[in-house]
Image (cartoon, rainbow, N blue to C red):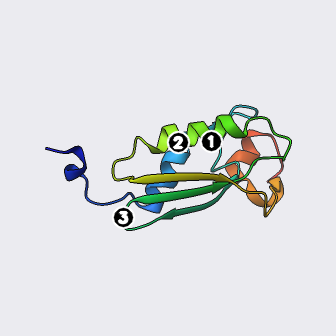
Amino acid sequence: MDVTELVDGPPTEAKVIEMLRDVIDPEVGINIVDLGLLREVAVSPNGAVRVATTLTTPACPLGPYITEQIYGTLYQLPGIADLEVEIVWSPPWDPDRDMSEEAKRLLGWPT
C-alpha cells in the first residue's frame, strides 16, 4: 500500500501555520509565525503548498537556514505533493505591526 493512500487530502492552511510554529529564528529564539515573518500560506486541492515569508532585514544572513527549516518541517506533513518557499520583501517586516503580543512580551517590548 502506498503511503499517500492513507492521507485524506492535503493539509489545511491552519495545519501548515501550526507546523511553522516549530521554525525558530535563531537570532531571537522566537518562531517565525509569532515573529510576524509569515506573509502567505496557500494550499491547493492537489496538495501543492506555497509559503511566502520575509526576514527581519534584507541583510539577514539566515534566509537559507530558515528556508531549509521550513522545508524540513513541512515535508513531515502528510498530503503535501509539492512545496514552494519564497522569501518576499513586500511589505517589509515591521515589528510593531507584525509581531504577536506573545513575541513582544518575550522580547520585553511594551504591548
Judged left or right of residue 4, residue 23 is right
For the point 38% across and 57% down, the residue is: 11
Residue 80 visible? The answer is: yes
> In the rendered structure, which amino acid carries the disc numbered 1?
Thr
Position in image of residue 30 (x %, y %): 67, 39
Dot 3 amino acid type: Asn
Front in this rendered view, residue 88 or 23: 88
Q: Earlier in the sequence, mark 1 or mark 3?
A: 3
Figure quadrant of the N terminus: top left
Q: CA distance from mark 1 to mark 2?
A: 6 Å
Label 1's element?
helix
Q: Position of residue 94 (x, y in %)?
A: 83, 56
In the displayed structure, would residue 45 be above or below residue 77?
A: below
**Which quadrant would the C terminus be assigned to in this image?**
bottom right
CA gap between label 2 and label 3 equals 18 Å
Q: Measured from the top left, where is residue 9 in percent x and y? A: 30, 60
Query: Which residue in the structure is indicated by mark 3?
Result: 46
Which residue is disc 2 drawn over? Answer: 71
Residue drawn at the location 68% of the way across and 48% of the way down = 102
Q: Is residue 94 left or right of residue 49?
A: right
Asked whether the residues under the numbered discs 2 and 3 touch, taking CB atoms below 8 Å apart as contact, a structural biologist would say no
- Left or right placement of residue 66 versus residue 46 in this view: right
Check contact, mark 1 vs mark 2: CB within 8 A.
Answer: yes
For residue 67, the mark is 1
- Residue count near mark 2 (Cα–Cα under 10 Å), binned few <14, some 14–19, many ≥20: some
